Image (spheres, grey):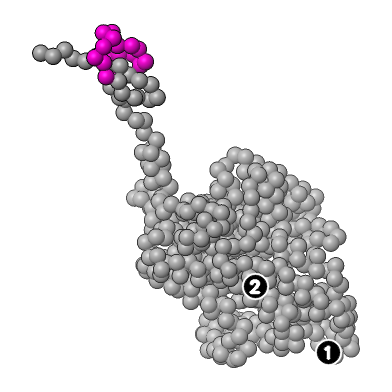
């Protein structure tokens, strides 16, 4: 159970975030208001007021940043994207829960076991509010982080955050997961899930060890992206950070995150930017079509099980358990495929004889599809996929050289995060922030920034921006002073010529003829 300090940290976060916005440049403060909250706020700690979603780590982070930008800093936030498809997806994402509620007003009862009441119209208020809160980082990222400088800020925040977080990670590798217990009074997840390979899987202050490993993988890849575009003086630092963070990731004992790292590092360091965007587009298209392919039996389940079995029997059994759950949950979801089963556990599968819940929802896609059906799935995952596809299309129409040196690598790393939503539910505010950042940047490059009320982004490095600023603010050379005071009459009173200068008339003596 959370201690008092956990609730103090949760409700003190708006004040902490405000200090960040008052002391840091706006783009850096916006990035760190999400990064720092993800790193330090308590997990499994919430307050559930009536008619609105619970106030927890994610919602408090999103609401704080959104309200500070609007109410304190006086900034306007546009909700609808510039693209027509983006507008449709945003509206569908916000409105589809109402259709889910209206199609699930009937009670859901079992012959043996729990009975679930029908959903009421006022439940739609909480669900729609929850959707809006989820999207707040997306709105802010699209509006205010759609620049190359903001991309560098996000990547640098990953690197710095990973270096700082490596210390408690090493501590938990040695002593077992204890940091959350020491600070907030309880362990946020099952203890046995933290045992792996004869040792401990660190978790620190995040939801699960898988969440920590995925985040640490992004930290290492961010260092690689920055190293590729850095000068000689900084390249050694980023290379050392990349190697060190890769070692820390190996200590996290998460095979999935290690596979992602082994895939991403060669892609970032050895392939062209065009290839990186192409692979990112293929990955998100695979994610978008996965439920359809899974339902049609086109996913090579047996091949994947054999590959997992070649590593270890436990890996194969774990993957088999996931596929069995998917089969049960998909069959249940197909009964209300368009708008889903809604909340209150109605999307789970129960044993008809004992009434026991026999389903475990691991992947985010399965949770969305079961609760909101095809409408909710296309809305949420369409918004996650759209930024990558739009940036890829812009790179083909306007040329890959128009992109910043950070955009392709960031886009590829983000696509892997979206891919991880198939086996896991690792959708966090940072994911939505990156989605909005990439979409806003793609819209600006596509020439839609003027329509969206934003300015086009300059494709220059931060160091080059400083040089450019100095060059554009150089003082003008002094002009030679003309003889005679401005506006003074000619000494001779005749034979004088006049010419305008700075709004006044200068009188110049006429040279005598020789």
Compare residues 213 and 467 and report the one nearer the observer. 467
The answer to which of marks 2 and 1 sits earlier in the sequence is 1
Side (left or right) of 122 relative to 97: right
Judged from the image, the secondary structure of the residue bearing numbered disc 1 is loop
- Where 316 falls versus 160 (above or below)? below
Q: Is residue 411 visible?
A: yes
> Residue visible at 36% across and 38% down?
471
Give the image location of residue 487, x and y in percent.
Answer: 37, 15
Q: Quadrant of the N terminus?
A: bottom right
Residue 485 counted in the magenta span? yes
**Which image quadrant for residue 296?**
bottom right
Side (left or right) of 195 relative to 9: left
Compare residues 221 and 252 and report the one nearer the observer. 221
Compare residues 185 and 419 and report the one nearer the observer. 419
Q: Quadrant of the C terminus?
A: top left
- The magenta region covers 482-497
Give the image location of residue 82, x and y in percent.
Answer: 56, 62
In the picture of the structure, the residue carrying the numbered disc 1 is 352
Side (left or right) of 102 relative to 330: right
**Which image quadrant for residue 372?**
bottom right
């Amino acid at each position: 159970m959370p201690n008092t300090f956990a609730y103090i940290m949760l409700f003190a976060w708006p004040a902490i975030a405000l200090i960040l916005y008052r002391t840091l440049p706006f783009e850096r403060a916006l990035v760190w208001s999400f990064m720092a909250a993800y790193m330090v706020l308590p997990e499994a700690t919430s307050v559930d007021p009536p008619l609105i979603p619970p106030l927890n780590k994610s919602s408090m982070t999103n609401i704080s940043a959104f309200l500070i930008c609007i109410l304190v800093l006086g900034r306007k936030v546009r909700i609808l994207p510039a693209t027509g498809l983006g507008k449709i997806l945003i509206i569908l994402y916000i409105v589809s829960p109402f259709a889910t509620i209206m199609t699930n007003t009937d009670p859901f009862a079992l012959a043996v076991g729990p009975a679930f009441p029908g959903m009421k119209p006022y439940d739609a208020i909480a669900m729609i509010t929850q959707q809006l809160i989820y999207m707040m980082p997306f709105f802010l990222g699209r509006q205010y982080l759609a620049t190359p400088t903001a991309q560098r800020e996000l990547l640098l925040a990953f690197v710095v955050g990973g270096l700082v977080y490596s210390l408690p990670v090493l501590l938990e590798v040695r002593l077992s997961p204890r940091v959350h217990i020491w600070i907030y009074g309880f362990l946020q997840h099952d203890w046995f899930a933290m045992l792996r390979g004869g040792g401990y899987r660190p978790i620190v202050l995040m939801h699960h060890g898988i969440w920590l490993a995925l985040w640490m993988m992004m930290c290492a890849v961010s260092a690689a992206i920055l190293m590729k575009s850095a000068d000689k003086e900084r390249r050694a630092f980023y290379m050392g950070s990349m190697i060190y963070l890769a070692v820390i990731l190996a200590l996290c004992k998460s095979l999935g995150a290690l596979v992602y790292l082994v895939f991403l590092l060669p892609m970032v360091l050895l392939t062209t930017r065009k290839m990186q965007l192409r692979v990112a587009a293929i990955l998100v298209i695979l994610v978008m079509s996965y439920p359809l392919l899974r339902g049609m039996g086109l996913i090579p389940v047996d091949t994947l099980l054999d590959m997992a079995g070649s590593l270890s029997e436990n890996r194969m059994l774990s993957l088999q358990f996931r596929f069995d759950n998917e089969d049960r949950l998909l069959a249940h979801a197909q009964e209300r495929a368009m708008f889903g089963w809604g909340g209150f556990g109605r999307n789970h599968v129960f044993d008809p004889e004992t009434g026991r819940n026999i389903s475990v929802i691991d992947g985010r896609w399965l949770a969305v599809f079961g609760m909101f059906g095809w409408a909710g799935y296309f809305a949420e995952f369409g918004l996650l996929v759209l930024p990558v596809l739009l940036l890829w299309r812009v790179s083909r129409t306007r040329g890959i050289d128009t992109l910043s040196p950070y955009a392709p690598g960031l886009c590829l790393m983000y696509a892997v995060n979206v891919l991880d939503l198939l086996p896991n539910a690792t959708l966090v505010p940072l994911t939505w922030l990156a989605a909005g950042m990439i979409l806003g940047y793609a819209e600006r490059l596509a020439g839609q920034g003027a329509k969206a009320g934003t300015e086009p982004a300059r494709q220059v490095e931060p160091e080059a921006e400083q040089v450019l600023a100095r060059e554009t603010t150089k003082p003008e050379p002094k002009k030679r002073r003309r003889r005679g005071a401005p506006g003074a009459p000619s000494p001779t009173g005749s034979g004088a010529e006049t010419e305008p200068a700075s709004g006044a008339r200068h009188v110049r003596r006429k040279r005598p003829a020789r």
